[in-house]
Every structure is written in structure tokens, then in C-alpha cells.
Image: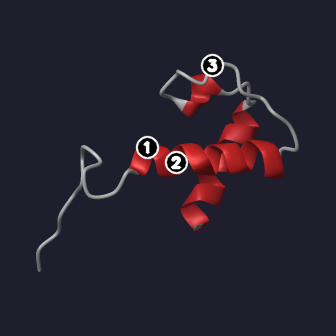
């Protein structure tokens, strides 16, 4: 068995995918726009989420 890991996002544009999930979570699940800095690469700093909201986002992302 061979396992490949896409570290730089060449095979799948994971950064865009994760940002899309972040936006959906922020607007649809949290019901608002908590975006603080769209240029920030880490969602923990990009959004004004509480620790509980960050945990909920990660748990929801893992279910997908």
C-alpha cells in the first residue's frame, strides 16, 4: 500500500477548501460575520471566535 500526503496543496487546493468551510461555519452556523482579518492564514486569528466556537468548527470539520 502506498500513502501520499499533499503538503503543499498541489493535488488539492486545501487552503481554499478550508477557507470556504470557515466562511460557511461563520455565516450559516454562527449566524454572523466575525471576520477580523481576511489576510490572516490561521482561522484562530482570522475570525473573532471564542474558544468554544473554534472547537465546534474543528469538530464539524472532522465530520465532513
Where residue 27 appears, as percent x and y from the top left, is: 80, 44
Residue 23: x and y, percent? 68, 43
Colouring method of the image: secondary structure
Tell me: 22 left or right of 7.
right
- In the rendered structure, the answer to whether residue 8 lies left or right of residue 30 reads left
Q: Is residue 45 above or below residue 22?
A: above
- Kind of element beneath mark 2: helix
- Residue 32 shown left or right of residue 60 in the figure: right
Residue name at image x 57 percent, y 67 percent: 64
Do the residues bearing badges 1 and 2 touch, measured as CB atoms within 8 Å?
Answer: yes
Mark 3 and 2 residues: CB-CB less than 8 Å, in contact? Answer: no
Mark 3 or mark 2, which has the lower sequence index? 2
**What residue is at 66 percent from the left and 48 percent from the top?**
57
Task: Quickly name the residue at label 1.
Answer: 15
Q: Residue at x 75, y 30 (%)?
A: 50
The answer for how far apart the CA atoms under marks 3 and 2 are is 16 Å
Residue labelled with disc 2: 18
User: Which circle marks residue 37 in the picture?
Assistant: 3
Badge 3: few (under 14), some or many (20 or more) residues near its Cα, within 10 Å?
A: few
Q: Position of residue 59 (x, y in %)?
A: 63, 55
Return the x and y of residue 51 as percentages of the image width and height: 70, 32
Circle 1 packing at 10 Å, graded few (<14), some (14-19), many (20+), is few
Query: Quadrant of the rendered structure where residue 11 is?
Result: bottom left
Which badge, 3 or 1, comes first in the chain's sequence?
A: 1
Farthest right residue?
A: 31
Question: Which quadrant holds the N terminus?
Answer: bottom left
Cα gap from disc 3 to disc 1, whole angstroms: 16 Å
Residue 31's image quarter?
Answer: top right
Q: Secondary structure at mark 1?
A: helix
Which corner quadrant of the image does residue 62 belong to?
bottom right
In the image, farthest residue toward the bottom: 1
Amino acid at each position: 500500500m502506498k500513502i501520499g500526503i499533499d503538503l503543499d496543496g498541489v493535488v488539492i487546493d486545501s487552503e481554499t477548501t478550508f477557507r470556504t468551510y470557515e466562511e460557511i461555519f461563520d455565516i450559516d452556523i454562527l449566524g454572523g460575520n466575525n471576520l477580523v482579518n481576511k489576510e490572516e492564514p490561521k482561522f484562530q486569528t482570522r475570525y473573532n471566535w471564542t474558544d468554544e466556537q473554534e472547537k465546534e468548527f474543528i469538530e464539524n470539520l472532522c465530520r465532513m
